[in-house]
Amino acid sequence: MRFPAPLFPATLVRRYKRFLADVVLPSGETVTVHCANPGSMIGLNAAGARVWLSKSGSPKRKLAHSWELVEVDLGGGAELVGINTVNPNALAAEAIAAGAVAELAGYAAVRREVKYGKNSRVDFLLEAPARPPCYVDIDPAYGAAFDAARAMGVEAIAYRCGISCEGIEVAEPVPIAE
């Protein structure tokens, strides 16, 4: 998944009201940017952190910039972490369509945001005539259900992603701890 244009750096001043952050641009100007992440972002929102922004070309948009990545040291040196919660599903859809995830390749149809059960949904439903349906759900809120499903024999896969200022790409499979 490529970003529409290369990202550019800024320095985080503060994040507030869940969807807003103030940053200092390389020019020295302080601006408010959109933060597409309603979570607490503990460890990812420290004042002074180097962040990476995208700029919207839409004149109708209230905030011209979006916060996409943050540079952090999680113990192994500086690395980029994606904070825009819109990107994971877009990345997964692109990777599935391109056959980049071998375990999910070969399905004739891929549907997004499919209702499942009474009050739930899955991110993707993969279907093919000669195969059982494959339900993909990458939302961390389903963690407990994920563990229960694994205990009953559901196959689980995880992939590492490479993150750069140009985009995010599926890299290699990683083991899932039992």
Image: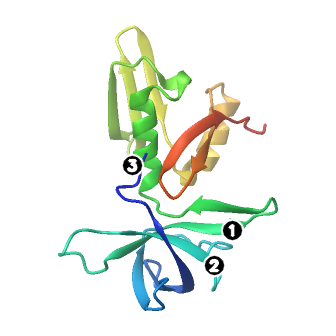
Q: Please, which residue is most extreme toward the right here?
A: 75
Query: Left or right: 177 with respect to 8?
Result: right
User: Which is more N-terminal, label 2 or label 1?
Assistant: 2
Whole-percent x and y of residue 59? 18, 75
Whole-percent x and y of residue 118? 38, 44
Q: Is residue 98 above or below residue 14?
A: above
Residue 119, disc: 3
Residue in the image at 46% along x and 40% along y: 92
Q: Quadrant of residue 97?
A: top left
Mark 1 closeness class: few <14, some 14–19, many ≥20 residues within 10 Å = some
Residue contact at pointers 1 and 2, CB within 8 angstroms: yes
| Residue with the mark numbered 2 | 49
Q: Could you say which is closer to the camera, residue 50 or residue 143?
A: 50
**Which secondary structure lies at badge 1?**
strand
Q: Please tell me whether mark 3 or mark 2 is closer to you in this view.
A: 2
> Could you give the CA–CA distance between mark 3 and mark 1, rounded to whole angstroms?
37 Å
Mark 2 closeness class: few <14, some 14–19, many ≥20 residues within 10 Å = some
User: Which is more N-terminal, label 2 or label 3?
Assistant: 2
- Does residue 37 appear in this view? no
Whole-percent x and y of residue 32? 40, 86
Which quadrant would the N terminus be assigned to in this image? top left
Query: Left or right: 147 with respect to 82?
Result: right
